[in-house]
Amino acid sequence: MPVCYQFAEKGTCRFGDSCRFEHIPHAPVSKEQKAPKVPKARKVVDQHRPVPDHIVAFFSRYPEFDYDSDLSFIDEFYRMCDHFGWRRYSNERDQARDAMRRAMVQQFNHTFGTNAEDLASWQKLCEIIQIDPIPDKLKQCRRAVVTSHINICDLLDAPFLGTAPTRFPTEVALSVYTRSFGKIFPRDEVEAGSLLEYLLRHILNPRPERGIQRGVKGGRKTS
């Protein structure tokens, strides 16, 4: 069983006894298994920052929980689960997770759009993930985004927290980070042919070397 690198480094893990990785204090972690160090997100103070309406609407269903919109919504979701004492795979947690997943897709579509042929939507994605210079052609914009390895949850946070999502060097590195921090995007909620579909990656079975073939959407089969 793979070693939980969070527990190995910190002695704690957000998933506790439900973690699918082995908890061994100070255990050596292989290079392939260990997530890369993620640089601290650069935050820009903006009093006119937009509000993630669909995410806020989700948390408003739970008025007993003090949701902080200045923090990552995924971290707040896990904090809410702890607040209510929802164990992993419990009915309450599963229902909340399903509602959150729908809100995530709605928020992405509202923020970035759904039309995969819209140049402005691709350019907005390029801006958020800090592709410079931003291409002025649809094909170049699409390729720049598709060949980048970005966690979609972090991408959703970016315009609302004033941060820039990390661009991982490989799909494997993205997979380790995504699974370690529980930031898996709901692929089953994604509409075929939409802009969002181009951002999906093989998280559960990442490819060591991910090439882009003409006419093939990157990572469309898994989240």
Image (cartoon, rainbow, N blue to C red):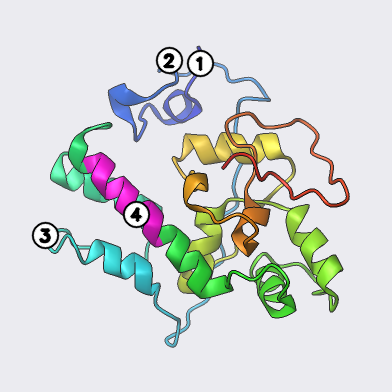
Q: Mark 3 points at which residue?
A: 64
Image location of residue 221, percent across then percent down: 64, 40
User: How busy is the neighbourhood of tag 1: few (under 14 within 10 Å), some, or many (20 plus)?
Assistant: some
Image location of residue 5, percent across then percent down: 50, 27
In space, the residues marked 3 and 1 are separated at their CA atoms by 39 Å
In space, the residues marked 4 and 1 are separated at their CA atoms by 34 Å
Vertical relation: 195 (above or below) 218: below
Q: Quadrant of residue 18?
A: top left
Under circle 2, the secondary element is loop
Range of magenta residues: 93-103
Q: Name the residue under label 2.
A: 24
Name which of mark 4 and mark 1 comes first in the sequence.
1
In space, the residues marked 1 and 2 are separated at their CA atoms by 5 Å
In space, the residues marked 3 and 4 are separated at their CA atoms by 17 Å
The quadrant of the rendering that contains the C terminus is top right
Residue extending farthest to the bottom is 48
Q: Is residue 60 left or right of residue 133?
A: left
Q: Name the residue under label 4.
A: 100
In space, the residues marked 2 and 4 are separated at their CA atoms by 32 Å
Q: Residue 27 carries which label?
A: 1
Specify the principal SS of the magenta part.
Answer: helix
Q: Is residue 139 left or right of residue 46?
A: right
User: How busy is the neighbourhood of tag 4: few (under 14 within 10 Å), some, or many (20 plus)?
Assistant: many
Under circle 1, the secondary element is loop
Name which of mark 2 and mark 4 comes first in the sequence.
2
Image location of residue 215, percent across then percent down: 84, 52
Taking the spot 64% from the left edge, 20% from the top edge, the residue there is 30
Name which of mark 3 and mark 1 comes first in the sequence.
1
